[in-house]
Amino acid sequence: MEIRLTGRVIRSGQAEGEALVSPAAIGFLGGVDPDTGIVLEPGHPLQGQSIAGKILVFPHGKGSTVGSYTILRLARAGAAPLAMINSSSEAITAVGAIIADIPMIDQIDIGLIQTGNRVRVDGEVVQVWQTEAGEAGDSTKNGPAPAH
């Protein structure tokens, strides 16, 4: 099953990969190891998991403005996500995506995406495919899924 969502482009681009979804905000400075992409924040739902090479889905960023540069460091180390999807972006994460050249989109109902889904970001469009590891939610909130 495929669902198609449309959001607001923060940093245009294309990426496709496996979703890693957090129900909690992410603070990049101190919360994510800039060399490995592993989430370090104690008690965070993604603690111990790597965001490297994933389509990172989370409500919004949090924390210090230096978090933008942490995202850039992640990209330079090859440990950045392929793309970022937010419910509502904020300046720290948006600037990080822009300077690190990471596709980013917001105004997406992230509850429709589950960890393990195959996700494609292409400009303002997010496509989500159900996989065995994760099942996409009800697409009727953002319109019907396209016919195959």
Image: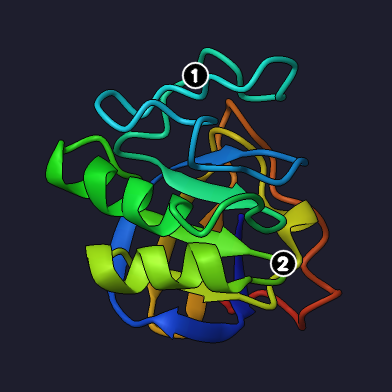
- Alpha-carbon neighbours of circle 1 within 10 Å: few (<14), some, or many (≥20)? some
Circle on res. 49 = 1
Residue in the image at 54% along x and 30% along y: 31
Q: As rendered, which of 52 and 112 lies closer to the eye?
A: 52
Circle on res. 66 = none
Looking at the rendered structure, the secondary structure element under dot 2 is loop
Looking at the rendered structure, the secondary structure element under dot 1 is loop
The amino acid pointed to by label 1 is Gln
Q: As rendered, which of 76 and 132 lies closer to the eye?
A: 76
Question: With 112 as the anchor, is 69 left or right in this view?
Answer: left
Residue in the image at 72% along x and 58% along y: 110
The vertical placement of 147 against 16, above or below, is: below
Question: With 110 as the anchor, is 100 left or right in this view?
Answer: left
Q: Position of residue 46 (x, y in %)?
A: 62, 24
Circle on res. 87 = 2
Residue in the image at 28% along x and 76% along y: 13
